[in-house]
Image (cartoon, helix red, strand yellow):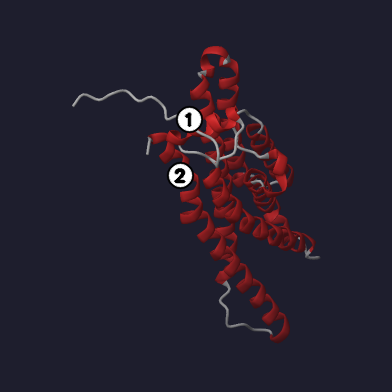
Amino acid sequence: MEFRDAILLLHPAIAVLVVFPFIGVVVNRALQTRQRRLEIKMTGKSKIPAVVGQEHVQLGRWLTGAVVGIVLLALANDIFSHILDHQLWMTALFQVIFIALLFAATIASIVLLYKAKERKWRAIFATLTGMGLVLLGCQDGVYRKTDQWYISHYYYGLTAAFLMIFSLAILPEIYKDRSNFWRKIHITLNCIALLIFMGQGITGTRSLLEVPLSWQEHYIQQLYEQKCDTRNCTIQAPSLPQKPL
């Protein structure tokens, strides 16, 4: 396995080791928080400690950063692999600089979103973060499968990131609103996000089978160019330099 293949596997590895465990803990704290609120409303007390609400908020904030970060990592791998393979700095230097600045601006926007207190600034930085992800996702080299967008790992991931960013942006409004309007919006959108994360597990596994490792690219390219099926197609092995005995 080459270095670029190891970098390719960082995205699914972090998803399995960090993001999905986070999701499980956040969902658990969310259920406990809701159960505690209902018990207090019905009986005036609850055995569930009050700290679960604070833990849910804090872990949810970390989950947003993890989701946005893993999306940026996947986009960076696809985009910069394309730049290196085609040596775009020789023919499209401005585009390479623009992409690098776009990554920096997107990261800065999500950091500032965490720090913003006023509603308008949270809306601005949330919008800028989302725009950055969309613009980066439109770059050449990104594995999108637009023709099958309804089962695309890319579009599921982008939608999940948008929902996480929106949840982070409206977090202060949930505690200010006495009508529970924003709380209901938060619950609804995050239930949708949970379903999308489940879809991510399925589509991500499929993508691991579809995206070739570096040593497989030669054979996949031949299949694509010859337009033949995998049962009856003959593929020539690449010529490798002879090593001295």
Query: Does residue 124 appear in the picture of this structure?
Result: no
* Nearer the observer, 174 or 222: 222
The quadrant of the rendering that contains the N terminus is: top left
Residue at 69%, 44% in the rendered image: 122
Where is residue 151? Give x, y as percent.
68, 49
User: In the drawing, what numbered circle is on residue 207?
Assistant: none
Where is residue 61? Give x, y as percent.
58, 54
Disc 2 target residue: 10
Instruction: Please state the total of marks drawn on the protein image.
Output: 2
Query: Does residue 145 appear in the picture of this structure?
Result: yes
The span from disc 1 to disc 2 (Cα, nearest Å) is: 23 Å
Marked residue nearer the N-terminal end (1 or 2):
2
Is disc 1 placed on a helix, strand or loop?
helix
Residue at 59%, 16% in the rendered image: 94
Q: Is residue 154 above or below residue 195?
A: above
Disc 1 target residue: 218
Residue at 70%, 78% in the rendered image: 38
* Nearer the observer, 225 or 88: 225
**What amino acid is at disc 2?**
Leu
Where is residue 20? Give x, y as percent.
53, 58
Which numbered disc, 1 or 2, marks the residue closer to the eye? 1
